[in-house]
Amino acid sequence: LALALGRASAPAGALLAAAGGGQPALAAAGWAGRYFDPEHPYCKRLILKLSDTEFRVNIADNKASKACKRTGADEERFVLEGRLSGADAEEMVIDFSPKGGPRDLVGKWDGSGIVFPDGNRWARTGNAGNR
């Protein structure tokens, strides 16, 4: 799965000027963070940096409905792998196969969140708390 992840606000040095287009390129450290997924309200969406190009994407989905209750009850958790082509890439490939999805879904950074091919957008809501 490939996706680009964005953030509402960036720590100093996390955003780099992109060549052309005026859209900021996201440095590897900037991918890590917490996200809100409108398709699964209040369900965990957390991206952790493992290296400049490798990430762990921790998510939870409610078994009974799309929305999570934030109690952990009825939630199924998944650990997904994400990768970048380079440290300043604006797209991340995420392997959603552990939860029955595609292995190479591409998400694109839009300046404050990640947009997926189906139009779903994860809005960045905070820091991940690592590196």
Image: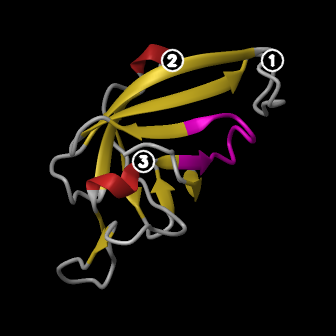
* Left or right: where 3 falls relative to 36: left
The residue that disc 2 covers is 99
Disc 2 or disc 3, which is closer to the eye? 3
Q: Amino acid at mark 3?
A: Ala
At mark 1, the secondary structure is loop
Residue 9 visible to the viewer: yes
Does residue 98 show up magenta in the picture? no
The residue that disc 3 covers is 32
Query: Which residue sits at x=52%, y=69%?
Result: 9
* Left or right: where 120 falls relative to 15: right
Query: Which residue sits at x=46%, y=21%?
Result: 79
On the image, the x and y values in percent for residue 121 come to 56, 54
Which colour style is shown?
secondary structure
Q: Which mark is residue 64?
A: 1
Q: Is residue 44 above or below residue 30?
A: above
Q: Amino acid at mark 2?
A: Lys
Q: Amino acid at mark 1?
A: Ala
Disc 3 or disc 1, which is closer to the eye? 3
* Left or right: where 73 falls relative to 113: right
Query: Which residue sits at x=74%, y=42%?
Result: 41
Specify start and end residues of the magenta stretch as a single range: 34-45
